[in-house]
Image: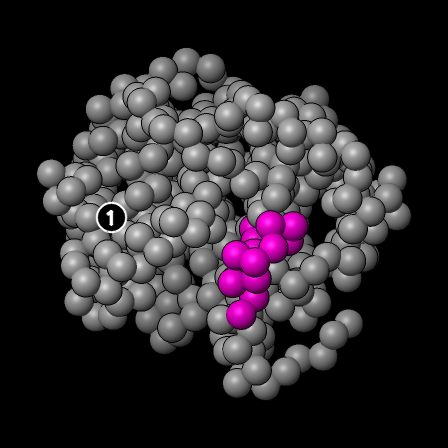
């Protein structure tokens, strides 16, 4: 395992590693690692369902995950997801492995917040590896009390989620490298009730970021994909008008605000089917590894690049396989455009023209509020 380095060197890494893909489109920026397919909730919109599966038999072991990590290049953004990630007992160890081996500078864990003790333990463990890494705990919230419980299928899940967030708030306040994020997913069931949830989150957690997504993939209840684009626009406008940071504090805050607004706009245009084509970088700068070692260019595509177990965990062999090149060709020919927010972030940030545009806007003016969201 690679040795830890000084904070100064890590600061340089944090600056350099995210920029490498601008010069080479053959290195991942974002890896979404599904560590389990198990979940203790039954959300109607979820595309990751553990019914009729044997996840414990399929799941990558901690030793297998370390082998994969050791064969991956340096990359900046790791998404540890599931299922519910904290149903595993080794989330802290998985975090440590990728910090040491791959120098990741941003670790994001989406969670339903139902395991407060495990989350607190993870927070305590990450204090040992702080350096310059940004840790994001993304709590899924789908509405206020009754609406959230209705969507998750578990009574009391909203109350338990809020208890978990309150429990860790003091840790977040003390640490600049730890952030609470709320993942709000727009669906048919909650599209008429989101405004009250957004107002609640902004009043109770004014400095916490809100991610706005839409139902994707093959949800348990297919009707949840029947959403009105105008409902998404209303929610996006509210988020834009109530930023989670002070836009006057730094050009970097304005840059990220500009990026977020561009992503919201692209998703809205995709829902309206008025979006202009922009090359998708899935399979080039982002990829998905599921809990059994299958690798996908995108979680919305069924065709796999291969299984890392079959490649003896040699990522580079799979990365340069004919199967991957064929999928990249299909993505290009299909002119893929989807409302997946993670893909949209990568596509926006690592498009040279858009990167220049974001930078100029963030340096010289309010980042697009009136232009895009009047």
- Residue 209 seen: no
Q: Residue at x 27, y 30 (%)?
A: 232
Tell me the quarter of the image containing the C terminus.
top left
- Residue 10 seen: yes
Q: Is residue 26 magenta?
A: yes
Q: Which residue is mark 1?
A: 201
Q: Choose between 365 and 231: the one closer to the eye.
A: 365
In the displayed structure, 275 sits above or below 108; it is above
Q: Residue at x 46, y 43 (%)?
A: 347
Left or right: 294 as drawn, with respect to 351: right
For disc 1, the neighbor class at 10 Å (few under 14, some 14 to 19, many from 20) is some
Q: Is residue 19 magenta?
A: yes
Can you give x and y, in whole percent of width and height, for residue 331 in the image?
59, 28
Left or right: 46 as drawn, with respect to 286: left
Find the magenta span and give its range.
16-30
In the displayed structure, 216 sits above or below 117; it is above
Can you give x and y, in whole percent of width and height, for residue 166 in the image?
34, 59
Q: Quick one: SS at disc 1?
A: helix
Answer with the quarter of the image where residue 301 lies: top right
In the displayed structure, 76 sits above or below 292; it is below
Can you give x and y, in whole percent of width and height, for residue 222 in the image?
47, 15
Q: Residue at x 51, y 36 (%)?
A: 280
Q: Residue at x 35, y 33 (%)?
A: 267
Tell me the quarter of the image containing the N terminus.
bottom right
Answer with the quarter of the image where residue 84 lies: top right
């Amino acid at each position: 395992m690679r040795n830890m380095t000084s904070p100064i060197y890590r600061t340089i890494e944090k600056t350099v590693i995210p920029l490498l893909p601008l010069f080479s489109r053959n290195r991942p920026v974002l890896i979404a690692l599904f560590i389990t397919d198990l979940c203790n909730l039954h959300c109607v919109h979820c595309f990751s369902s553990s019914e009729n599966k044997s996840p414990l038999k399929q799941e990558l072991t901690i030793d297998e995950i370390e082998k994969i990590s050791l064969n991956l290049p340096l990359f900046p953004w790791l998404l540890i997801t599931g299922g519910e990630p904290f149903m595993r007992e080794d989330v802290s160890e998985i975090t440590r492995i990728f910090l040491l081996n791959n120098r990741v500078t941003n670790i994001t864990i989406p969670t339903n917040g139902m395991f407060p003790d495990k989350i607190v333990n993870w927070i305590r463990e990450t204090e040992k590896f702080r350096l310059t890494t940004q840790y994001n705990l993304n709590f899924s919230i789908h509405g206020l009390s009754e609406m959230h419980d209705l969507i998750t299928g578990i009574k009391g899940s909203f109350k338990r989620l809020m208890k978990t967030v309150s429990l860790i708030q003091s840790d977040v306040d003390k640490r600049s490298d730890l952030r609470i994020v709320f993942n709000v997913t727009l669906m048919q069931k909650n599209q008429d009730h989101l405004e009250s949830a957004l107002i609640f989150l902004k009043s109770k957690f004014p400095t916490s970021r809100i991610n706005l997504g839409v139902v994707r993939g093959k949800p348990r209840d297919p009707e949840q994909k029947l959403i009105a684009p105008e409902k998404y626009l209303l929610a996006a406008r509210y988020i834009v008008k109530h930023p989670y940071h002070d836009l006057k504090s730094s050009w970097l805050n304005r840059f990220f605000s500009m990026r977020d607004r561009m992503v919201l706009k692209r998703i809205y245009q995709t829902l309206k089917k008025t979006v202009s084509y922009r090359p998708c970088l899935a399979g080039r700068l982002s990829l998905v590894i599921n809990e059994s070692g299958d690798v996908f260019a995108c979680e919305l595509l069924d065709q796999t690049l291969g299984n890392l177990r079959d490649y003896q965990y040699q990522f580079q062999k799979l990365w340069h396989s004919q199967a991957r090149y064929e999928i990249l060709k299909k993505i290009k020919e299909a002119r893929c455009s989807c409302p997946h927010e993670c893909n949209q972030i990568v596509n926006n940030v690592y498009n040279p023209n858009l990167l220049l545009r974001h930078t100029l806007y963030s340096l010289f003016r309010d980042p697009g509020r009136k232009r895009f969201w009047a």
